[in-house]
Image: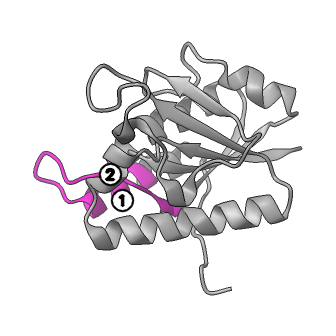
Amino acid sequence: MSSALLVIDMQNDLVDALSSERRDDLLAAISELLRDARANRTPVVYVRHNEDGPLRFGTPPWEIAASVAPLPGEPIVEKRFGDAFQETDLANVLTDRGIDELLVCGMQSDFCVVATVRGAMKRGYGVTLVENAHATYASDGKTEREIIDELHRSLRLSGVPILSVDRNT
């Protein structure tokens, strides 16, 4: 089996809407994942959302945050839906690289991250979600922590492993 790190929607507009502490923690965790993946020659695949609003193609808010930006040759899959597999070439990008396992991180936990995790499972990929390398915003009277805890419970029940990045090693 061959794995890849899948970095979802780490775009300026989404990342900048987080509190500064949460943003710094998220960027540090994903930076660590990227360092490890690149050091181990694990493929890194990016996903970037496109829409008519703030994440409009080619605008500064649409760009991937500089501290976690792709290196030359790392593919970026452009998407319009929550599930990064829906009407994109993500499956082809993964197949071309012999990828059947995904380590997932990024934005927004309760939208694009979970939709892509479920889309990957539906297509037969092994998926692991990195616990401290995805984020969302408080909504509907729930804190971010409550939303993420509910998401983790649901995914664990579906058989998705959830691990944490240890930034002290």
Residue 132 in sight in this render: yes
Q: Residues within 10 Å of mark 2 (few under 14, many from 20)?
A: many
**Residue type (three-letter) at the residue carrying disc 1:** Asp
Task: Tell me the residue at 85%/26% (across/down).
Answer: 96
Q: Residue 59 or 13: which is nearer the viewer? A: 59
Residue 150 in sight in this render: no
Query: Mark 2 — residue?
Result: 136
**Residue type (three-letter) at the residue carrying disc 2:** Thr
Task: Tell me the residue at 76%/20% (across/down).
Answer: 92
Q: Which residue lies furthest to the top in this view?
A: 87
Q: Residue 151 or 167: which is nearer the viewer? A: 167
Query: Mark 1 — residue?
Result: 149
Secondary structure found at label 2: loop
Magenta stretch: residue 147 in it? Answer: yes
- The percent coordinates of residue 91 (x first, y second) are 71, 23
Q: Which residue lies furthest to the front in this view?
A: 59
Q: Quadrant of the N terminus?
A: top right
Instruction: Report whether 26 appears left or right of 167.
Output: left
Magenta stretch: residue 88 in it? Answer: no
Numbered range of the magenta stretch: 131-152
Q: Determine whether 2 is above or below 132 in the image.
A: above
Q: Do the residues labelled 1 and 2 touch (CB within 8 Å)?
A: no
Q: Residues within 10 Å of mark 1 (few under 14, many from 20)?
A: few
Secondary structure found at label 1: helix
- The percent coordinates of residue 109 (x first, y second) are 40, 47
Q: Quadrant of the C terminus?
A: bottom right
Q: Which residue lies furthest to the left in this view?
A: 141
Q: Determine whether 34 is above or below 59 in the image.
A: below
